[in-house]
Image (cartoon, helix red, strand yellow):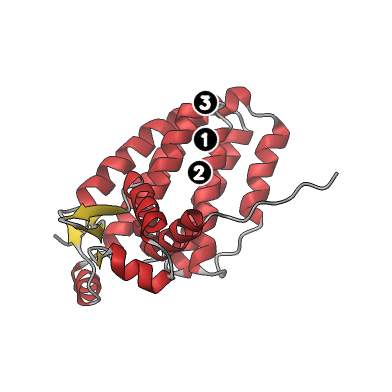
């Protein structure tokens, strides 16, 4: 018996489109949004537009701005806190992955890395990084760690987009991912945890470099709103 595949609802379609545009920085942080404007732009009615915005609000991607809405600014203080959370969760998850993951599981994680070429697009690099970290934590068999990681990666998505903008930065990330996998395959929990923490720290440093004074001015010139400071970044 053939099953009918249900088409996405209008709310789902609007949510997916807005979320993709926000994460890809096609809608700038700090940009004002109105339900009426989105209705006209998306040829949609008010209720699904509002429902989509509320869903994006729960992910920290938009926030209320008086009677309207605003794309959430990039808050570098929040970014720093999320990276600290990732160090704690993913380092612990690496140890649990060594306990629970089979050799086949780890080989599949390695294959995920081999399928990516740093010469691929920025979007591909962003997607690969997300997939790698979520799959690594999934091997811990702890659903709460997985949920925390998915949420953190979503909230960091716009800044991670900046961090993987060059082929060199993508190549560095892949090299660090590969070192983590080698430690997992060797069943060396302390080394795997150390490399996970080092990788996330290096990510923070690369992000800081991408937001140096000159680049930060360039982002602001495009209308981006960047709040507070991150070690190594312009304030």
Q: Which quadrant holds residue 159?
A: bottom left
| Residue 133, disc | 2
Residue at 58% over, 34% down: 184
Sequence order check, earlier mark of 2 and 3: 2
**Residues marked 3 and 1 touching at CB (< 8 Å):** yes
Local secondary structure at mark 1: helix
- Left or right? Give the position of 22 relative to 141: left
Quarter of the image that includes the N terminus: top right
Q: Which mark is residue 97?
A: none
**Residue 166, horizontal then vertical, whole percent:** 44, 69
Residue at x 23% of width, y 75% of height: 218
Q: Which residue has dot 3 on it?
A: 142
Q: Earlier in the sequence, mark 3 or mark 1?
A: 1
Q: What's the CA distance linking mark 3 and mark 1? A: 8 Å
Q: Secondary structure at mark 2?
A: helix
Is 125 on the left-hand or right-hand side of 40?
right
Mark 2 closeness class: few <14, some 14–19, many ≥20 residues within 10 Å:
some
- Does the rendering let one see residue 5? yes
Q: Quadrant of the C terminus?
A: bottom left
| Contact check, label 1 and label 2, Cβ < 8 Å | yes
Q: Which residue is mark 1?
A: 137
Identify whether 235 is placed above or below 58.
below
Q: Is residue 79 or residue 191 the one in the foreground?
A: 79
Q: Residue at x 41, y 41 (%)?
A: 151
């Amino acid at each position: 018996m053939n099953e009918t595949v249900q088409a996405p609802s209008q709310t789902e379609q609007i949510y997916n489109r807005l979320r993709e545009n926000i994460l890809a920085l096609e809608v700038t942080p700090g940009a004002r949004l109105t339900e009426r404007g989105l209705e006209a732009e998306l040829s949609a009615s008010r209720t699904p537009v509002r429902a989509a915005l509320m869903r994006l609000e729960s992910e920290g991607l938009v926030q209320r701005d008086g009677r309207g809405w605003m794309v959430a600014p990039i808050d570098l203080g929040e970014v720093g806190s999320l990276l600290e959370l990732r160090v704690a969760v993913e380092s612990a998850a690496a140890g649990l992955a060594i306990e629970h993951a089979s050799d086949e599981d780890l080989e599949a994680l390695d294959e995920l890395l081999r399928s990516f070429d740093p010469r691929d697009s920025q979007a591909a690099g962003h997607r690969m990084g997300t997939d790698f970290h979520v799959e690594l934590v999934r091997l811990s068999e702890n659903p709460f760690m997985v949920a925390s990681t998915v949420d953190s990666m979503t909230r960091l998505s716009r800044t991670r987009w900046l961090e993987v903008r060059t082929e060199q930065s993508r190549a560095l990330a892949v090299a660090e991912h590969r070192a983590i996998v080698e430690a997992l395959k060797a069943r060396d929990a302390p080394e795997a945890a150390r490399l996970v923490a080092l990788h996330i720290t290096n990510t923070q440093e690369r992000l800081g470099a991408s937001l140096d004074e000159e680049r930060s001015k360039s982002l602001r010139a495009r209308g981006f709103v960047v709040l507070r400071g991150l070690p190594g970044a312009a304030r």
